[in-house]
């Protein structure tokens, strides 16, 4: 399995303003009507992914799911 | 080795006014580990602070504490402050290089297990330090946790510790997010009793539901409500919005601040610690200190880090929100970082300056800062800090900066990371061979030092690879290439060459190298290193049979150290003690050891050297049991250094076994000897000869080989001893005469009289042959002098028999519970005895009690 760059969807409980995008290194933030937020973007490697999750932890935001895509689903 | 400690990390937060009492959380107790695990803003620190004893050992951890030496230095320092004496020994072992962490912790556990009092250790924000290496030590600590120690951990993520095992043994108390959330009653108490907002039950219930009892959010809500006329309207708006709670509330609070306050909060969020002048530098506005005090009074985001209103930080949660807003709103953030970097650079905090330079995208400036800081950090032995920058500075930049590159080479080698070092050195040589204007160098003079420095590191690489000839060659190149006045390179190279010569048995060359190294170090003011070199120099001089020169070396080093109590001063006295012992002045020898102990300026090797020296004195007094206990203790606390191990403690112990007549045990030692003919085994071979003489076995061949080798090698001190053994083995006064002739100018006594009756009869024969020679007669007289017996106990308040029993066990490896079992008493009784022993001996630790006991001769076996 490729352990390097990949695209991720990280779903959180709660609505996070899109202006947090810069805080999460330019990932895109989409809020949904069910009161969740999805952070989507390319993550360089596993260490970067854990760094991202740590930032979420530090904000006290409940984590719902983490999904990995081999290709950018938007392409 | 860690440099100066950051005091604010050991600061215990004062409990603030206006807290909600939470007795329901404090009822749980009686376990070894209390784990408070919950996300940010759940009141973990407040809870732990209410829980821990007033004198708790407190460490506020940071990401830099993932480095084990840093982590344990803080933890042990905090313990030492909470219970003076308890961690002193462990700190000394920790600073001795890179001992396994279990070795360090065994020393502190040994003290803790007999500690009369309880001690609480608080590790706040443990998630910042958690990692494989920290877990290893923490797990060991928890597996051996004495009942006297209670550990409290606050963390945002469950630590990688054996929690399930502790849980099943009932040794873990856990407080988690669900416990920490404010209940409806607590929300009520907080909003109405503490903040005095006077909200009705419905409003309280709404806020409780929206924040889910999250304390940080409730605090922000209370801030937003203060001075608001339409509390109900605000609460409705808040409840009807599903935005991230903290985001929403920080917006509310920020939007109500005057523009300068809002700006201040956002701009200063880029730094970790806040102090007036730093804030002024970052914002470019005066009044930072007053602003911080006003924020503290209004309870607005800041947490004080000391009692003097100098340093603050933002609450972690708010700092993140502020930084995220700053990122979204402003485009000049790199300027803020650049100004922070400049302030830190000017105040000498290179670590922070580098961090902000990198954040400002100014890697070149960061590289400049590192390049300038390297010599200072190396002098302070803070190579671990340099190593952390390896990942920060891109390789292509290092490839243009040879001075920076050699700094990294030095740091890697100091950290025992030799892999790839040769490659890096070759890279630097390629850089230097290329065009000069392609190189980036902050201080051009440093560039001239490179050729010498490169060869010095090559010499060190050879020494580590076990290639003394290569070491000597490269060291000679280094000295040849060193520029005029580069004493650091020439002294390092000289000392390396000396070490290589020593391992090869060329004592004269070793002495030359070391003496040149010490002189150079003295010229550039590295006095602490001169003290370290003096031990080696005197050791070589003693081997050469130059006792007077060794005496002068120690005295000179003491004079250099002056009143400063530099590390290593104590070790000079241990050295002087050895020389006094050889002159058979046992009183003075003991006196030097007492001075050594009182000084408390030890090198890491002092604990074992001190015990060996004391064992010699006890042996000379005829107390062979205590001498053996001391040698066993010395073996337990042994810490090596760069010097070759020319007198292994196991061989020193074997000699004592021979003196005790325990020839079977001594033979076991001999059977385990590695077969080797090099000079490094000479002491062991002489020991073997002693064993064979005691066993009435023929060792004439072995002794003759040793005699020739020591005589050719200029190892006159050893030669004298071998001649003594030859004289004894052959009962030949003529050989003794030769030994005495060589020994007389240097005043040797013990080397002769320690051999007892057979030597005395040889000396008498010799005296009859040469009645006019004073030296043999003096030796015979010395032998018959009876030493004053030590007064049974010179303590004002003597120890009871039971206390003596406990004291004797304190010298062993047994922990508190085992001592209690041995004496068939409770652990509490042992702790009470320990307390009385410490008071009577005027010490505060097990280690000090044991030393004092040996010094006062309290443990002489009278049976």
Image (spheres, coloured by chain):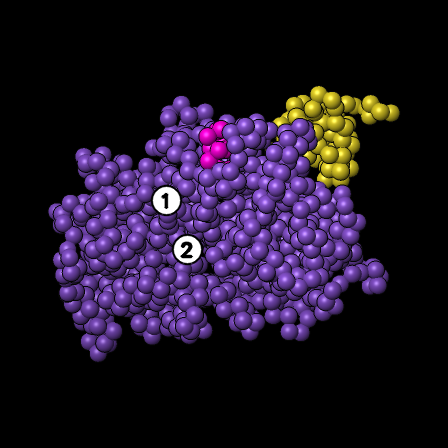
Chain colours: A yellow, B purple
Query: Residue B53, labelled with which disc?
Result: 1
Q: Can you give x and y, in whole percent of width and height, for residue B444 in the image?
A: 74, 68
In the figure, B108 relative to A65: above or below? below
Q: Which disc number belongs to residue B558?
A: none
**Residue at image coords 22%, 44%:** B832
Query: Quick check: is B189 in the magenta stretch?
Result: yes
Check disc 2: other Cα within 10 Å, few if <14, some if 14-19, many if 20+. some
Q: Main secondary structure of the magenta part?
A: helix
Q: What residue is drawn where x is 61% and y is 34%?
A: B232
Magenta residues (range): B182-191
x 39%, y 34%: residue = B23
Q: Quadrant of residue B584?
A: bottom left
Identify the secondary structure beneath mark 1.
loop
- Between B432 and B783, the residue placed more toward the observer is B432
Q: Say which label, 1 or 2, has the lower sequence index.
A: 1
Q: Specify whether residue B845 is painted magenta.
A: no
Q: Can I make out residue B661 in this image? A: no
Question: Which residue is at a point 66% across and 32% down the rendered structure image?
Answer: B237
Find the distance from the CA under tag 1 to the CA under tag 2. Answer: 35 Å
Q: Which one is closest to the eye, mark 1 or mark 2? A: 1
Q: Position of residue B334 (x, y in %)?
A: 76, 52
Using the rendered image, report if marks 1 and 2 lie on a common chain. Answer: yes
Q: Chain of mark 2?
A: B
The image shows residue B65 at horizontal and vertical percentages of 54, 46
Position of B668 compared to B71: left or right?
A: left
Badge 2 element: loop
Residue B207 or residue B603, whichever sits in front: B207
Residue in the foreground of this view, choosing between B535 and B282 = B282
* Label 1 neighbour load within 10 Å: few <14, some 14-19, many 20+: some
User: Residue B605, labelled with which disc?
Assistant: 2
Which image quarter: residue B732?
bottom left
Farthest residue in the right direction?
A75
């Amino acid at each position: 399995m490729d352990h390097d760059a990949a695209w991720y969807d990280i779903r959180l409980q709660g609505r996070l303003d899109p202006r947090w995008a810069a805080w999460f290194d330019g990932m895109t933030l989409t809020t949904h009507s069910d009161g969740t937020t999805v952070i989507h973007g390319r993550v360089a490697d596993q260490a970067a992914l854990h760094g991202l999750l740590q930032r979420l932890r530090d904000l006290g935001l409940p984590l719902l799911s983490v999904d990995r895509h081999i290709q950018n689903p938007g392409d | 080795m860690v440099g100066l400690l950051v005091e604010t990390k050991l600061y215990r937060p004062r409990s603030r006014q206006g807290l909600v009492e939470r007795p329901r959380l404090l009822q749980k107790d009686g376990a070894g580990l209390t784990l408070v695990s919950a996300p940010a803003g759940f009141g973990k620190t407040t809870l732990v602070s209410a829980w821990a004893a007033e004198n708790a050992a407190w460490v506020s951890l940071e990401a830099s504490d993932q480095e084990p030496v840093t982590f344990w230095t803080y933890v042990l320092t905090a313990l030492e402050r909470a219970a003076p004496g308890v961690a002193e020994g462990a700190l000394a072992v920790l600073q001795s290089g890179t001992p396994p962490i279990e070795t360090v912790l065994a020393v502190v556990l040994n003290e803790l297990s007999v500690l009369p009092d309880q001690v609480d250790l608080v590790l706040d924000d443990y998630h910042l330090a958690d990692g494989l290496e920290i877990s290893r030590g923490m797990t060991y600590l928890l597996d051996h946790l004495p009942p006297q120690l209670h550990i409290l951990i606050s963390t945002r993520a469950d630590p990688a510790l054996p929690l399930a095992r502790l849980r099943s043994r009932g040794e873990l108390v856990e407080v988690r997010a669900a416990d920490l959330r404010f209940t409806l009653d607590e929300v009520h108490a907080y909003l109405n009793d503490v903040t005095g907002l006077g909200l009705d039950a419905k409003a309280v219930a709404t806020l409780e539901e929206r924040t889910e009892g999250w304390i940080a959010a409730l605090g922000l809500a209370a801030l937003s409500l203060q001075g608001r006329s339409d509390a109900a309207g605000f609460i409705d708006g808040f409840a009807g919005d599903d935005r991230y709670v903290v985001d929403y509330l920080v917006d509310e609070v920020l939007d109500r601040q005057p523009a300068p306050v809002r700006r201040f909060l956002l701009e200063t969020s880029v730094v970790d610690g806040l102090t007036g002048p730093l804030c002024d530098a970052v914002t470019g506005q005066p009044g930072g200190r007053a602003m911080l005090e006003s924020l503290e009074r209004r309870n607005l985001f800041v947490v004080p880090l000391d009692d003097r209103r100098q340093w603050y930080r933002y609450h972690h949660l708010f700092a993140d929100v502020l930084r995220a807003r700053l990122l979204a709103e402003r485009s000049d953030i790199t300027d803020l970082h650049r100004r922070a970097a400049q302030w830190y650079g000017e105040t000498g905090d290179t670590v922070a300056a580098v961090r902000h330079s990198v954040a400002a995208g100014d890697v070149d400036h960061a590289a400049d800062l590192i390049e300038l800081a390297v010599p200072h950090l190396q002098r302070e032995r803070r190579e671990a800090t340099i190593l952390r920058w390896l990942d920060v500075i891109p390789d292509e930049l290092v490839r243009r900066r040879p001075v920076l590159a050699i700094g990294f080479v030095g740091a890697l080698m100091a950290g025992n990371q030799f892999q790839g070092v040769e490659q890096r050195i070759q890279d630097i040589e390629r850089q230097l061979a290329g065009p000069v204007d392609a190189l980036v160098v902050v201080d051009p003079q440093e560039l001239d030092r490179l050729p010498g420095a490169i060869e010095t590191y090559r010499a060190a690489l050879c020494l580590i690879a076990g290639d003394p000839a290569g070491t000597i060659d490269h060291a000679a190149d280094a000295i040849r290439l060193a520029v005029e006045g580069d004493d650091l390179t020439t002294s390092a190279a000289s000392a390396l060459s000396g070490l290589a010569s020593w391992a090869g048995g060329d004592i004269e060359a070793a002495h030359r190298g070391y003496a040149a190294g010490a002189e150079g170090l003295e010229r550039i003011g590295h006095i602490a290193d001169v003290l370290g070199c003096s031990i080696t120099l005197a050791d070589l001089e003693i081997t050469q049979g130059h006792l007077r020169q060794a005496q002068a070396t120690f005295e000179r080093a003491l004079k250099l150290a002056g009143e400063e109590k530099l590390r290593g001063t104590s070790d000079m006295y241990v050295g002087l003690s050895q020389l006094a012992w050889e002159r058979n002045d046992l009183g003075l020898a003991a006196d030097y050891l007492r001075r050594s102990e009182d000084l408390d300026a030890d090198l890491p090797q002092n604990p074992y050297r001190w015990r060996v020296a004391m064992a010699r004195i006890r042996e000379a007094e005829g107390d062979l049991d205590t001498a053996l206990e001391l040698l066993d203790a010395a073996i337990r606390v042994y810490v090596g250094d760069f010097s070759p191990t020319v007198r292994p403690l196991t061989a020193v112990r074997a000699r004592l076994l021979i003196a005790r007549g325990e020839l079977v045990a001594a033979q076991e030692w001999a059977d385990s000897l590695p077969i080797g003919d090099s000079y490094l085994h000479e002491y062991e071979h002489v020991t073997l000869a002693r064993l064979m003489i005691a066993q009435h076995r023929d060792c004439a061949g072995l002794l003759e080989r040793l005699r020739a080798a020591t005589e050719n090698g200029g190892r006159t001190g050893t030669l004298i001893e071998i001649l003594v053994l030859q004289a004894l083995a052959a009962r030949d006064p003529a050989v003794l005469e030769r030994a005495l002739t060589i020994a007389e100018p240097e005043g040797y006594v013990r080397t002769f009289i320690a051999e007892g009756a057979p030597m005395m009869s040889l000396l008498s024969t010799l005296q009859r042959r040469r009645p006019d020679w004073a030296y043999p007669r003096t030796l015979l007289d010395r032998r018959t002098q009876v030493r004053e017996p030590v007064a049974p106990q010179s303590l004002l308040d003597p120890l009871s028999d039971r206390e003596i029993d406990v004291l004797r066990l304190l010298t062993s490896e047994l922990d508190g519970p085992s001592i209690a079992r041995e004496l068939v008493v409770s652990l509490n009784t042992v702790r009470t005895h320990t307390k009385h022993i410490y008071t009577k001996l005027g010490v505060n630790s097990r280690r000090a009690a044991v030393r004092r006991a040996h010094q006062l001769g309290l443990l002489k076996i009278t049976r």
